[in-house]
């Protein structure tokens, strides 16, 4: 492996050595890793006035151990994405204090005063006025800046080359954009959904549409993406009375189709809506897709006059955004499907007293989003379908 794997007890000396912390005797550390992939430690001093988070990628998938090797270079992708976002949307990510490329470790702001959006939603709270709008803006700001509208052509080619992430893209190509539609040992589902899983595998039209989205994912180098923009990659809360939204964990970042980021978020929004419907606890769920799209579109159009290449004219941006919309609808569908009959499922549904009705409804919605995405041209069309 050739690098230093940090344990809880190593963190104080590590932070001191790296120049992040003066008094090495006053650092208390706890591990808070709750994801599948990496380790996260929180360090704070005795009176709580100073704290930092350390995230390190191991040379394997954390929850699987050495039997599932995975290159720690995913941490490079995460650091690179944060570096790009910091230029255009620093208020929407944690403050990054440093990246140690030798040890694949990122030192960043401690956000433990905030909560993961999925947790907040699963506990029955609403989104509030801010979360989806900030996320839509986040996607617009990151993707405009790293597209051929925001960067000169040579810099863009360099960004594309530097951001190639074959291992993590392959995970998405397999787990999200093919396995759920074929027989595969990764797939599993509730027994009551076996009929739908079988019909999806036999559905030639569905498969061709997923192939189309998969091909776009593989080839459409529109802009730098977050790559895993689900509600577990967003923290929300309040600081000094003002709402705070922070997007984190961009380790799947690569240069791809913008609709992939929006679609992933929308899938999670729609799944959380079906959870709330099942529990009789619907609040503002139905507004979120529209709010995030409107914020994305508004911000993208606001930035449009600053584009570096004015051969792309005003009529072109309309066409471009309408393609992004259609891709987003399709990717929302693929993300829903894979979260119900694929490898990794969502607690939104799995923790329901009876997950079957909501899972069936959502799965059928996912299929419609994929196959009918060309005719679903507005948030209202999607509301009608839901
Ligand atoms: N900067 C931070 N401040 C406070 N807590 C954090 C911070 N970063 C991560 N966490 C906590 O650690 C958890 C895991 O972080 P993260 O999602 O980045 O790791 P991961 O291993 O890449 O997860 P996944 O398997 O979902 O990809 C988060 O859900 C959150 O609870
Ligand atoms: Mg992650």
Image (cartoon, grey):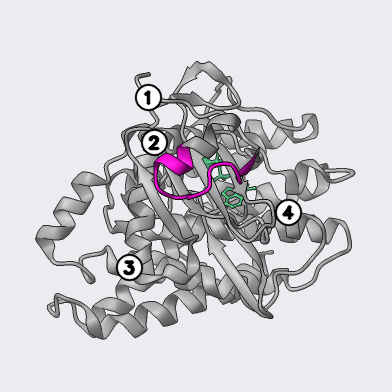
* In the image, residue 26 lies in the stretch drawn in magenta: yes
Any atom of ligand 1 within 8 Å of the CB at mark 4?
no
Q: Which mark is residue 119?
A: 4
Query: Camera-side residue: 150 or 323?
Result: 150
The answer for how far apart the CA atoms under marks 3 and 4 are is 29 Å
The answer for how far apart the CA atoms under marks 1 and 4 are is 34 Å
Q: Earlier in the sequence, mark 3 or mark 1?
A: 1
The mark closer to the camera, 3 or 4, is 3
The answer for how far apart the CA atoms under marks 1 and 2 are is 8 Å
Secondary structure, mark 1, is loop
Q: Which residue is tagged 1? A: 3
The mark closer to the camera, 4 or 2, is 2
Q: Please give the range of residues in magenta.
A: 14-29
Q: Which mark is residue 87?
A: 3
Residue 258, position in %: x, y? Answer: 38, 60
Mark 3 touches mark 1? (CB < 8 Å):
no
Q: Which residue is tagged 2? A: 104
The answer for how far apart the CA atoms under marks 2 and 3 are is 22 Å
The reply, left or right, for residue 67 in relation to residue 276 is left
């Amino acid at each position: 492996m050739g690098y230093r794997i940090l344990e809880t007890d190593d963190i104080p000396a590590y932070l001191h050595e790296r120049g992040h912390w003066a008094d090495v005797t006053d650092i208390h550390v706890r591990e808070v890793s709750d994801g599948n992939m990496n380790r996260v430690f929180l360090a704070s001093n005795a009176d709580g006035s100073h704290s930092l988070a350390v995230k390190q990628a191991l040379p394997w998938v954390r929850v699987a151990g050495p039997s599932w090797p995975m290159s720690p270079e995913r941490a490079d992708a995460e650091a690179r994405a944060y570096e790009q976002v910091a230029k255009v949307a620093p208020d929407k990510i944690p403050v990054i204090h440093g990246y140690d490329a030798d040890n694949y470790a990122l030192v960043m702001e401690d956000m433990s005063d905030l909560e993961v959006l999925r947790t907040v939603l699963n506990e029955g709270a609403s989104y509030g006025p801010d979360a989806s709008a900030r996320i839509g803006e986040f996607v617009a700001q990151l993707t405009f800046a790293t597209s051929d509208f925001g960067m000169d052509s040579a810099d863009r080619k360099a960004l594309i080359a530097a951001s190639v992430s074959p291992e993590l893209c392959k995970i998405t190509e397999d787990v999200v954009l093919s396995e759920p539609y074929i027989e595969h040992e990764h797939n599993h589902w509730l027994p009551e959904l076996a009929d739908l899983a079988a019909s999806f595998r036999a559905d030639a039209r569905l498969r061709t549409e997923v192939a189309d989205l998969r091909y776009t994912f593989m080839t459409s180098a529109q802009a730098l993406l977050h790559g895993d923009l689900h509600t577990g990659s967003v923290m929300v809360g309040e600081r000094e009375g003002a709402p705070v939204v922070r997007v984190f964990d961009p380790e799947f970042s690569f240069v791809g189709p913008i609709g992939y980021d929006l679609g992933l978020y929308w899938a999670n929004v729609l799944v959380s809506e079906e959870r709330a419907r099942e529990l009789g606890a619907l609040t503002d769920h139905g507004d979120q897709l529209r709010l995030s799209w409107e914020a994305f579109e508004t911000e993208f159009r606001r930035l449009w006059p600053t584009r570096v290449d004015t051969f792309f004219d005003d009529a072109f941006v309309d066409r471009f955004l309408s393609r992004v919309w259609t891709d987003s609808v399709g990717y929302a569908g693929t993300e829903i499907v894979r979260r119900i009959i694929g490898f990794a499922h969502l607690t939104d549904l799995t923790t329901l007293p009876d997950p079957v009705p909501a899972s069936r409804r959502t799965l059928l919605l996912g299929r419609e989003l994929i196959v009918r995405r060309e005719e679903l041209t507005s948030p209202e069309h999607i509301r009608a379908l839901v």
